[in-house]
Image: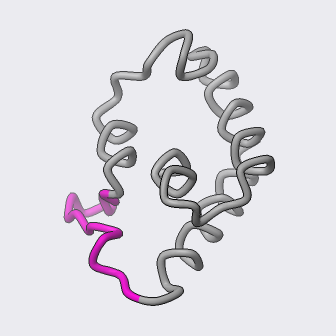
Amino acid sequence: MITYCLKNNYLNPNKAEQVKAQLLGKLGMGTQQQQAPKDPGYLQGLGGMITGSNGQTFSMDKLQGDLKEKACDFVLDNAKSLL
């Protein structure tokens, strides 16, 4: 999801790339260029799809206005808590 947000300019690239690299490193995946993760959830996140705990999916493309940016900020804040 962080990559989706970066690609669409919803996050500050400096902060988001750092968190993304730390998360991938923590999972033993290195950077995306070195080893592309094949996890289905990760791959869905690249396209802006969010899967809930009940299995339902939601596309970030359905959000309007500044809600996409707020959602991306929320994702980044929660990602930081995993470090």
The part of the chain drawn in magenta is: 49-64
**29 left or right, relative to 61:** right
Q: Residue at x 38, y 87 (%)?
A: 64
Q: Which residue extends farthest bottom?
A: 65
Return the residue nearer the eye: 69 or 54: 69
Say whether residue 45 is left or right of residue 24. left
Residue 65, compared with residue 25, is above or below; it is below
- Where is residue 7? Give x, y as percent: 50, 50
Please state the horizontal and vertical placement of residue 57, each as a whole percent of the image.
22, 63
Residue 7 vs 61, above or below: the answer is above
Residue at the spot 20% in from the left edge and 65% down from the top edge: 56
- Was residue 55 drawn as part of the magenta stretch in this picture? yes
Specify whether 5 is left or right of 55: right
The residue nearer to you, when weighing 53 against 24, is 24
What x and y, as percent, mark residue 39?
Answer: 35, 28
Which image quadrant for residue 76?
bottom right
On the image, the x and y values in percent for residue 10 come to 58, 66
Residue at (56% x, 16% y) in the render: 29
Instruction: Give left or right: position of 23 versus 41.
Output: right
Between 65 and 43, the one lying in front of the other is: 65
